[in-house]
Amino acid sequence: MSAALSPGVAVLGAGHLGSAIANALVLREVARRVVLYDRRLARAEGEAWDIGDAVPHLREQVIEETDDLSDLSGVSVVVVAVGPTVATSQNRLELFDVNASLIADTMAALDAVVPDAVVLIVSNPVDLLTRVALEHTRRPPRLVLGSGTVNDTARLRYALARRIGVDHANVHAYIIGEHGQSAFVVWSSALAGGIRIEDFPADPGVGGWDDLKRELEAFTHSRGAEIHRRKGYTNFGTATAVTSVVQSVVRDERRVLPVSCSAAPEYGLPPGTVMSLPCVVGAAGTEQCLALPLDGRESALLTSSQAALQEVYERRMQRS
Protein backbone atom coordinates (compact mmCIF):
# COMPACT_ATOMS: atom_id res chain seq x y z
CA MET A 1 0.00 0.00 0.00
CA SER A 2 1.38 3.43 -0.89
CA ALA A 3 1.94 6.00 1.85
CA ALA A 4 -0.76 8.55 2.52
CA LEU A 5 -0.09 12.07 1.35
CA SER A 6 0.59 14.65 4.09
CA PRO A 7 -1.75 17.63 4.49
CA GLY A 8 0.53 20.37 3.17
CA VAL A 9 4.04 21.66 2.41
CA ALA A 10 5.01 25.21 1.46
CA VAL A 11 8.01 26.34 -0.56
CA LEU A 12 9.19 29.95 -0.24
CA GLY A 13 10.90 31.18 -3.39
CA ALA A 14 9.90 30.22 -6.93
CA GLY A 15 13.35 30.53 -8.45
CA HIS A 16 15.36 27.73 -10.06
CA LEU A 17 15.68 25.80 -6.80
CA GLY A 18 12.35 26.56 -5.15
CA SER A 19 10.35 25.62 -8.24
CA ALA A 20 12.40 22.43 -8.65
CA ILE A 21 11.65 21.53 -5.01
CA ALA A 22 7.93 22.11 -5.53
CA ASN A 23 8.06 19.96 -8.66
CA ALA A 24 9.91 17.15 -6.85
CA LEU A 25 7.38 17.23 -4.01
CA VAL A 26 4.58 16.78 -6.53
CA LEU A 27 6.30 14.08 -8.58
CA ARG A 28 7.09 12.09 -5.43
CA GLU A 29 3.54 12.66 -4.14
CA VAL A 30 4.68 13.80 -0.72
CA ALA A 31 1.78 16.13 0.11
CA ARG A 32 -1.86 16.65 -0.80
CA ARG A 33 -1.22 20.39 -0.96
CA VAL A 34 1.90 22.22 -2.14
CA VAL A 35 1.97 26.01 -1.73
CA LEU A 36 4.52 27.91 -3.82
CA TYR A 37 5.20 31.42 -2.53
CA ASP A 38 7.09 34.19 -4.28
CA ARG A 39 6.98 37.94 -3.76
CA ARG A 40 6.38 38.17 -7.52
CA LEU A 41 2.98 36.55 -7.94
CA ALA A 42 3.33 36.08 -11.70
CA ARG A 43 6.47 34.01 -11.18
CA ALA A 44 4.75 31.82 -8.59
CA GLU A 45 1.77 31.43 -10.91
CA GLY A 46 3.86 30.42 -13.90
CA GLU A 47 5.81 27.78 -12.00
CA ALA A 48 2.79 26.47 -10.06
CA TRP A 49 0.62 26.20 -13.17
CA ASP A 50 3.38 24.38 -15.05
CA ILE A 51 3.95 21.97 -12.16
CA GLY A 52 0.20 21.53 -11.79
CA ASP A 53 -0.04 20.20 -15.33
CA ALA A 54 1.74 17.07 -14.06
CA VAL A 55 -1.04 16.27 -11.59
CA PRO A 56 -3.35 14.55 -14.14
CA HIS A 57 -0.62 11.91 -14.45
CA LEU A 58 -0.32 11.44 -10.66
CA ARG A 59 -2.47 11.13 -7.57
CA GLU A 60 -4.71 14.10 -6.85
CA GLN A 61 -2.80 17.04 -5.37
CA VAL A 62 -3.48 20.75 -5.03
CA ILE A 63 -0.79 23.20 -6.19
CA GLU A 64 -1.34 26.73 -4.94
CA GLU A 65 0.51 29.90 -5.86
CA THR A 66 0.67 33.00 -3.69
CA ASP A 67 2.51 36.19 -2.78
CA ASP A 68 0.80 36.30 0.64
CA LEU A 69 2.41 34.38 3.51
CA SER A 70 -0.94 34.09 5.30
CA ASP A 71 -1.90 31.53 2.63
CA LEU A 72 0.59 29.12 4.22
CA SER A 73 -1.77 28.50 7.12
CA GLY A 74 -2.21 24.79 7.82
CA VAL A 75 1.02 23.46 6.26
CA SER A 76 3.21 21.17 8.35
CA VAL A 77 6.55 21.96 6.66
CA VAL A 78 7.93 25.17 5.17
CA VAL A 79 10.94 24.96 2.83
CA VAL A 80 12.83 28.28 2.66
CA ALA A 81 14.62 28.81 -0.66
CA VAL A 82 14.65 32.61 -0.79
CA GLY A 83 17.43 35.04 -1.66
CA PRO A 84 20.07 35.20 -4.37
CA THR A 85 21.96 32.07 -5.34
CA VAL A 86 25.72 31.79 -5.45
CA ALA A 87 27.37 33.24 -8.55
CA THR A 88 30.00 31.31 -10.48
CA SER A 89 32.82 33.41 -8.99
CA GLN A 90 31.50 33.18 -5.39
CA ASN A 91 31.58 30.64 -2.62
CA ARG A 92 28.48 30.07 -0.48
CA LEU A 93 29.81 32.00 2.53
CA GLU A 94 29.88 35.24 0.52
CA LEU A 95 26.06 35.20 0.45
CA PHE A 96 25.75 35.39 4.22
CA ASP A 97 25.48 39.15 4.58
CA VAL A 98 22.72 39.56 2.03
CA ASN A 99 20.71 36.47 3.04
CA ALA A 100 20.97 36.68 6.85
CA SER A 101 18.60 39.63 7.23
CA LEU A 102 16.19 38.02 4.79
CA ILE A 103 16.09 34.79 6.81
CA ALA A 104 15.63 36.68 10.09
CA ASP A 105 12.63 38.57 8.65
CA THR A 106 11.24 35.37 7.13
CA MET A 107 11.34 33.53 10.45
CA ALA A 108 9.47 36.36 12.19
CA ALA A 109 6.79 36.21 9.52
CA LEU A 110 6.52 32.42 9.72
CA ASP A 111 6.21 32.54 13.52
CA ALA A 112 3.09 34.64 13.02
CA VAL A 113 1.51 32.36 10.42
CA VAL A 114 2.70 28.77 11.00
CA PRO A 115 4.32 28.69 14.47
CA ASP A 116 4.15 24.89 14.75
CA ALA A 117 5.50 23.97 11.31
CA VAL A 118 8.92 22.44 10.71
CA VAL A 119 11.07 25.00 8.86
CA LEU A 120 13.69 23.64 6.48
CA ILE A 121 16.31 26.18 5.38
CA VAL A 122 17.76 25.60 1.91
CA SER A 123 19.16 29.05 1.10
CA ASN A 124 22.95 29.37 1.26
CA PRO A 125 25.16 29.41 3.23
CA VAL A 126 22.77 26.90 4.75
CA ASP A 127 24.56 26.17 8.05
CA LEU A 128 24.97 29.84 8.96
CA LEU A 129 21.45 30.72 7.82
CA THR A 130 20.02 27.86 9.89
CA ARG A 131 21.82 29.39 12.87
CA VAL A 132 20.25 32.76 12.09
CA ALA A 133 16.84 31.10 11.75
CA LEU A 134 17.23 29.44 15.15
CA GLU A 135 18.18 32.78 16.70
CA HIS A 136 15.17 34.58 15.23
CA THR A 137 12.28 32.23 15.95
CA ARG A 138 10.07 31.49 18.92
CA ARG A 139 9.46 27.89 17.86
CA PRO A 140 11.36 25.01 19.54
CA PRO A 141 14.87 24.48 18.06
CA ARG A 142 13.96 20.98 16.87
CA LEU A 143 11.52 22.55 14.40
CA VAL A 144 14.28 24.38 12.50
CA LEU A 145 16.87 22.57 10.38
CA GLY A 146 18.83 23.06 7.18
CA SER A 147 19.34 20.83 4.14
CA GLY A 148 22.99 20.49 5.17
CA THR A 149 25.13 17.94 3.37
CA VAL A 150 22.30 15.56 2.44
CA ASN A 151 22.97 15.96 -1.28
CA ASP A 152 26.77 15.86 -0.84
CA THR A 153 26.46 12.63 1.13
CA ALA A 154 24.16 11.11 -1.49
CA ARG A 155 26.71 11.93 -4.21
CA LEU A 156 29.46 10.28 -2.19
CA ARG A 157 27.51 7.12 -1.43
CA TYR A 158 26.39 6.69 -5.01
CA ALA A 159 29.86 7.24 -6.47
CA LEU A 160 31.48 4.90 -3.93
CA ALA A 161 28.84 2.21 -4.51
CA ARG A 162 29.47 2.29 -8.25
CA ARG A 163 33.20 1.93 -7.76
CA ILE A 164 32.93 -1.09 -5.45
CA GLY A 165 29.99 -2.72 -7.23
CA VAL A 166 27.16 -2.60 -4.69
CA ASP A 167 23.80 -0.89 -4.43
CA HIS A 168 24.16 2.58 -2.92
CA ALA A 169 21.58 1.71 -0.25
CA ASN A 170 24.22 -0.61 1.24
CA VAL A 171 26.84 2.14 1.60
CA HIS A 172 26.86 4.13 4.84
CA ALA A 173 29.16 7.14 4.90
CA TYR A 174 28.71 10.81 5.73
CA ILE A 175 30.04 14.16 4.62
CA ILE A 176 29.82 16.55 7.57
CA GLY A 177 30.86 20.03 8.69
CA GLU A 178 30.12 23.06 6.56
CA HIS A 179 28.03 22.56 3.43
CA GLY A 180 30.88 24.04 1.43
CA GLN A 181 34.63 24.07 1.06
CA SER A 182 35.51 22.75 4.55
CA ALA A 183 33.18 19.73 4.45
CA PHE A 184 34.86 16.33 4.72
CA VAL A 185 34.14 12.60 4.54
CA VAL A 186 34.07 10.60 7.77
CA TRP A 187 35.98 7.63 6.44
CA SER A 188 36.66 6.09 9.87
CA SER A 189 33.03 4.94 10.15
CA ALA A 190 32.28 4.38 6.45
CA LEU A 191 30.78 0.96 5.77
CA ALA A 192 29.57 -1.11 2.83
CA GLY A 193 27.34 -4.01 3.78
CA GLY A 194 28.45 -3.60 7.39
CA ILE A 195 32.13 -3.97 6.42
CA ARG A 196 34.72 -1.20 6.80
CA ILE A 197 35.42 0.31 3.38
CA GLU A 198 39.12 -0.58 3.54
CA ASP A 199 38.22 -4.23 4.23
CA PHE A 200 35.51 -4.56 1.61
CA PRO A 201 36.31 -7.28 -0.98
CA ALA A 202 36.59 -4.97 -4.00
CA ASP A 203 39.43 -3.66 -6.12
CA PRO A 204 39.95 0.04 -5.31
CA GLY A 205 42.27 0.52 -8.29
CA VAL A 206 46.01 0.77 -8.76
CA GLY A 207 46.37 3.55 -6.21
CA GLY A 208 44.61 1.61 -3.47
CA TRP A 209 41.98 2.85 -1.07
CA ASP A 210 43.80 6.08 -0.22
CA ASP A 211 43.79 7.21 -3.84
CA LEU A 212 40.16 6.20 -4.27
CA LYS A 213 39.18 8.19 -1.18
CA ARG A 214 40.99 11.27 -2.47
CA GLU A 215 39.30 10.88 -5.85
CA LEU A 216 35.84 10.60 -4.31
CA GLU A 217 36.45 13.57 -2.01
CA ALA A 218 37.56 15.68 -4.97
CA PHE A 219 34.49 14.58 -6.93
CA THR A 220 32.03 15.46 -4.18
CA HIS A 221 33.70 18.82 -3.55
CA SER A 222 33.75 19.85 -7.21
CA ARG A 223 30.53 18.34 -8.53
CA GLY A 224 28.24 21.26 -7.66
CA ALA A 225 30.73 23.83 -8.95
CA GLU A 226 31.15 21.95 -12.23
CA ILE A 227 27.38 21.81 -12.75
CA HIS A 228 27.13 25.50 -11.86
CA ARG A 229 29.89 26.39 -14.32
CA ARG A 230 27.99 24.70 -17.13
CA LYS A 231 24.36 25.72 -16.48
CA GLY A 232 24.67 28.65 -14.08
CA TYR A 233 22.99 27.03 -11.07
CA THR A 234 22.18 23.66 -9.51
CA ASN A 235 18.63 22.59 -8.71
CA PHE A 236 17.45 19.08 -9.61
CA GLY A 237 19.73 17.03 -7.35
CA THR A 238 19.34 19.44 -4.45
CA ALA A 239 15.57 19.51 -4.93
CA THR A 240 15.40 15.74 -4.70
CA ALA A 241 17.58 15.75 -1.56
CA VAL A 242 15.36 18.39 0.04
CA THR A 243 12.26 16.38 -0.85
CA SER A 244 13.78 13.37 0.94
CA VAL A 245 14.16 15.47 4.09
CA VAL A 246 10.59 16.75 3.81
CA GLN A 247 9.30 13.22 3.28
CA SER A 248 11.12 12.01 6.40
CA VAL A 249 9.31 14.71 8.37
CA VAL A 250 5.80 14.37 6.98
CA ARG A 251 5.83 10.56 7.01
CA ASP A 252 7.74 10.38 10.32
CA GLU A 253 10.32 8.09 8.70
CA ARG A 254 12.97 8.95 11.34
CA ARG A 255 15.76 8.72 8.79
CA VAL A 256 19.31 9.60 9.83
CA LEU A 257 20.29 12.54 7.62
CA PRO A 258 23.24 14.99 7.76
CA VAL A 259 21.20 18.16 8.17
CA SER A 260 22.18 21.58 9.52
CA CYS A 261 21.47 21.44 13.25
CA SER A 262 22.82 22.46 16.64
CA ALA A 263 25.87 20.28 17.27
CA ALA A 264 25.59 17.59 19.94
CA PRO A 265 27.73 18.43 23.01
CA GLU A 266 29.80 15.28 22.47
CA TYR A 267 31.56 17.00 19.55
CA GLY A 268 33.10 19.50 21.97
CA LEU A 269 32.25 22.51 19.78
CA PRO A 270 31.34 25.98 21.13
CA PRO A 271 27.72 26.57 22.18
CA GLY A 272 25.57 27.85 19.34
CA THR A 273 27.44 25.88 16.68
CA VAL A 274 25.23 24.85 13.76
CA MET A 275 26.74 22.46 11.22
CA SER A 276 25.80 19.61 8.92
CA LEU A 277 25.72 16.54 11.18
CA PRO A 278 23.74 13.28 11.30
CA CYS A 279 20.33 13.67 12.93
CA VAL A 280 17.23 11.56 13.33
CA VAL A 281 14.64 13.46 11.27
CA GLY A 282 10.96 12.80 11.81
CA ALA A 283 7.62 14.43 12.49
CA ALA A 284 9.08 16.39 15.41
CA GLY A 285 11.89 17.78 13.23
CA THR A 286 15.42 17.03 14.37
CA GLU A 287 14.46 14.50 16.99
CA GLN A 288 18.06 13.69 17.92
CA CYS A 289 21.47 14.96 16.82
CA LEU A 290 23.79 11.97 16.83
CA ALA A 291 27.40 12.01 18.03
CA LEU A 292 29.21 10.37 15.11
CA PRO A 293 32.50 8.76 16.24
CA LEU A 294 35.47 10.63 14.75
CA ASP A 295 39.17 9.83 14.70
CA GLY A 296 41.76 12.48 15.58
CA ARG A 297 42.12 13.79 12.04
CA GLU A 298 38.36 14.06 11.57
CA SER A 299 37.91 15.85 14.89
CA ALA A 300 40.51 18.40 13.80
CA LEU A 301 38.74 18.87 10.46
CA LEU A 302 35.41 19.42 12.20
CA THR A 303 36.97 22.01 14.51
CA SER A 304 38.53 23.75 11.51
CA SER A 305 35.22 23.76 9.65
CA GLN A 306 33.46 25.25 12.68
CA ALA A 307 36.13 27.95 12.94
CA ALA A 308 35.64 28.91 9.29
CA LEU A 309 31.89 29.30 9.81
CA GLN A 310 32.35 31.16 13.09
CA GLU A 311 34.71 33.67 11.48
CA VAL A 312 32.13 34.59 8.86
CA TYR A 313 29.38 34.77 11.48
CA GLU A 314 31.38 37.04 13.80
CA ARG A 315 32.44 39.32 10.97
CA ARG A 316 28.81 40.01 10.16
CA MET A 317 27.91 40.52 13.83
CA GLN A 318 30.63 43.17 14.12
CA ARG A 319 29.21 45.04 11.12
CA SER A 320 25.59 44.89 12.22
Image (cartoon, rainbow, N blue to C red):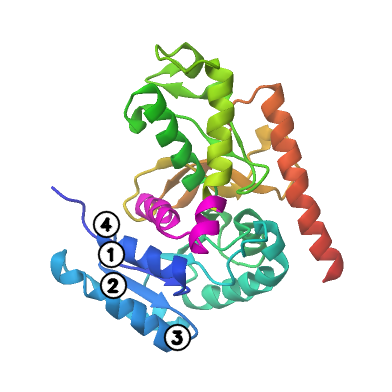
Give SS at disc 4. loop
Residue 240 lies within the magenta run: yes
On screen, residue 187 versus residue 60, left or right, reads right
Instruction: Say above or below: 46 vs 3.
Output: below
Screen quadrant of the C terminus: bottom right
Tell me if I can see residue 73 in this picture.
Answer: no
Going from N to C along the chain, the mark reached first, 4 or 2, is 4
Alpha carbon distance from label 2 to label 1: 8 Å
Secondary structure mostly taken by the magenta-highlighted segment of the chain: helix
Q: Are marks 3 and 4 in contact (CB under 8 Å)?
A: no
Residue at numbered disc 1: 26
Quadrant of the rendered image containing residue 54: bottom left
Tell me if I can see residue 243 in this picture.
Answer: yes
Q: Which residues are magenta?
A: 225-248
On screen, residue 42 versus residue 212, left or right, reads left
Task: Residue at 35% x, 49% y: name it.
Answer: 252
Alpha carbon distance from label 3 to label 4: 25 Å
Query: Which amino acid type is marked by label 2?
Result: Ile
Give SS at disc 2. helix
Going from N to C along the chain, the mark reached first, 2 or 1, is 1
Q: Are marks 4 and 2 in contact (CB under 8 Å)?
A: no
Alpha carbon distance from label 4 to label 2: 12 Å
Q: Position of residue 228 (x, y in %)?
A: 53, 58
Give SS at disc 3. loop
Residue at numbered disc 2: 51
Task: Residue at 31% x, 52% y: name it.
Answer: 251
Tell me, for residue 67, which label it has, or none: 3
Q: Position of residue 245 (x, y in %)?
A: 41, 51
Going from N to C along the chain, the mark reached first, 3 or 1, is 1
